Image (cartoon, rainbow, N blue to C red):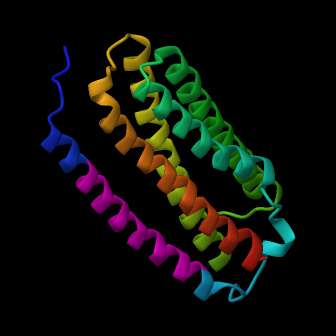
Amino acid sequence: MMAEPSEHGAARGKVGMACMILAESTLFAIFVVAYLFYIGKSLSGPYPKDVLDLPLWASAALLSSSITITLAVRALRRGAQGGFALWWGLTIALGAFFLGATAIEWKGLIYDHNLTIWTNLFGTTYFTLVGFHAGHVTVGLLLLSLTLVFGLRGALRGSHVERVEVLSWYWHFVDAVWIVVFTVVYVVGR
């Protein structure tokens, strides 16, 4: 049986997540600056304009997942376990779609365009930045899936709403970072 969270525990969780988001934002900022610094400095191709397509469907899926996770938290707050499971599961599905689309994009870049992390500066900075983001999506999906399992087993109660909400902050962070990555890589960098 899960221990009931205290008011202080929920506050510590919020502070902890805020600090983690701040630290991760700093790391992402370093990768974004590196990507921007090295735009156009590759001596050989392929170049971004030659190989990158706008990942519109994947982006729409990921950004929509911020809506579904918010609806899931609201449903849990109301005690609507079924609504929580539905919206939370849809959030996971949207995130998985995003990761699948990223994998397909990478397969095309690697096998069709011979772009790897070792090919040129573009490949190095692209795979590092987008890969760092994909890693965060993967961690988020694992945590969301574990939470869904608890929810489906009936182990989430109203007293767990604050913890679930703190986890949703991480997911919103991943979505917000994607807006920056999308803009830098697929708009500015092309």
Residue 28, relative to residue 80: is it above or below?
A: below
Residue 185, quarter of the rendered image? bottom right
In the depicted view, which residue is nearer to us: 27 or 81?
81
Judged by its main secondary structure, the magenta piece is: helix
The residues colored magenta run: 14-35
Q: Is residue 179 above or below residue 39?
A: above
- 101 or 128, nearer to the observer: 101
Report the front residue among 139 and 165: 165
Provide residue 98's location: percent of width, then percent of height.
66, 44
Name which residue lies at 48% across and 56% down.
Answer: 173
Residue 78, image x, y percentages: 44, 24
Percent coordinates x, y for residue 17 in the rendering? 30, 53
Depicted 146 relative to depicted 37: above or below? above
The magenta stretch spans residue 44: no
For the N terminus, which image quadrant? top left
Residue at the outermost front position: 78
Q: Tell me the quarter of the picture where residue 27 sits.
A: bottom left
Q: Is residue 65 left or right of residue 172?
A: right
Residue 150: x percent and y percent? 37, 19
Residue at 83 percent of width and 55 percent of height: 112
Residue drawn where x is 62% and y is 36% of the image = 96
Question: In this rendering, does residue 174 appear at all?
Answer: yes
Q: Residue at x 53, y 40 (%)?
A: 70
Asked if one can make out residue 189 in the rendered structure from this viewpoint, the answer is: no
Looking at the image, which is closer to me, 73 or 46? 73
**Furthest residue in direction right, as rendered:** 50
Q: Is residue 173 above or below residue 120?
A: above
